[in-house]
Image (cartoon, rainbow, N blue to C red):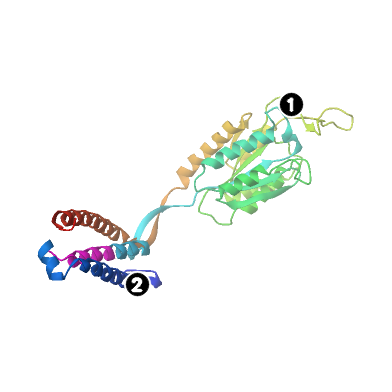
Amino acid sequence: MNFEYPTYLKGFWFLLPLIALFVLDYRWRISRFLRMGTPSMLYRTLGLFPKFVLIARYGIRLLLIAALILVLARPKGGMTDSPRTKARTQLVFCLDASRSMLAEDLQPNRLSRAKQAISAVLKRLQGDQVALVVFAGSAHIQLPMTNDYGAAMMFLEAVSTDYPSVQGTSISAALKEAIKTLPEQTEGEPAIVLMSDGEDHEGDLPPILNELKQRGVRVFAMSIGSQVAAPIPNNGSYLTDLQGKLVFTKPNEEMLNKIASETNGFFVKGNDPSTALNKVMSEIDRLKKSTNLSAEASIGREELFLPFLWFAFALLCLDLVFVSQWEKWLRKWSIFG
């Protein structure tokens, strides 16, 4: 069977400096031992000249280091087939950052509760890729597709209603940007998690929904807010219209439900965003298990480092036993101690 090593380890040139070092150390130790007498006198006194013991010890340690280096080199054998699973889910979180998300029907406000829910999900994701789209009257990609959850947490924390340049709520713009974050072809199951109060002020949703259906992208929609209309905070007061009347906001569940159903997604009420998002993730996991985790054959090389690892472990045990027994024997027979 052919072995495959890194180029710099071929030829075992890495052992030459070790051999030279061991030889020099061995000669130094022998010279120190011979100060106690001539070889013939020491042989008669101790019954065995220690140089044979030293040679054995150095041989064991040389083999031990060589075996450990071979383990680190990770030799590989022939080709082998192993099962693997397809890529995990690609999630795009579309988060509404319009002024209406500052409503305090959820404490401290709708936006904060939505961010807390996403943060909790990011902490327990494993392997899935995530992207973040923030929208109001316009939309922008806050974070492209990534599996760096630490970066996702930082970009999520930076989301604010002050950032969007155009106020309002354009869900169609958010879905357009979400599509841009998804690759044209993917082995995973792409999904969009839309978190909004649903007060869409744009009317061009049908073309976007058709594109999502053609690409097989599901939208999982969450309405953020309670069923009781709430005023919108505005610079220490509340937002009013041109007649000076308070402007109230209430989630548009009907529209969000329609978006989810037309894309074979899932809708859930978000009067408790954390619980609602957990339901959405459970539904995504269910779909992922049924459609995404089929096994495929993956061709690779057989790993052969394990025998060398066991060989190194055996040599280490032998060296420890050898040293302890030799020291006991030497103390027993030595005439100098």
- Using the rendered image of the protein, determine whether residue 194 is visible from the camera's viewpoint: yes
Report if residue 79 is visible in the image.
Answer: no
Highlighted magenta segment, given as a residue range: 47-63
From the viewer's perspective, tell me whether residue 46 is left or right of residue 208: left
Q: Determine whether the residue tagged by mark 2 lies in a helix, strand or loop.
A: helix
Mark 2: give few (<14), some (14-19) or many (20+) Cα within 10 Å. few
Q: Residue at x 18, y 53 (%)?
A: 328
Residue 311 relative to residue 134: left or right: left
Compare residues 31 and 247 and report the one nearer the observer: 31
Q: Which image quadrant for residue 224? A: top right
Query: What's the amino acid at mark 1?
Result: Ala
Which numbered circle lies on residue 17?
2
In which quadrant of the rendered image does the N terminus lie? bottom left
Instruction: Pick out the residue farthest to the top.
Output: 228
Relative to 117, residue 39 above or below: below
Q: Who comes first in sequence, dot 1 or dot 2? A: 2
Q: Position of residue 39 (x, y in %)?
A: 15, 70
Q: Position of residue 260 (x, y in %)?
A: 61, 39
Amino acid type at mark 2 = Pro
Q: Circle 1 sits on which residue?
A: 229
Q: CA distance from mark 1 to mark 2?
A: 80 Å
Give the percent coordinates (x, y) of residue 140: 70, 49
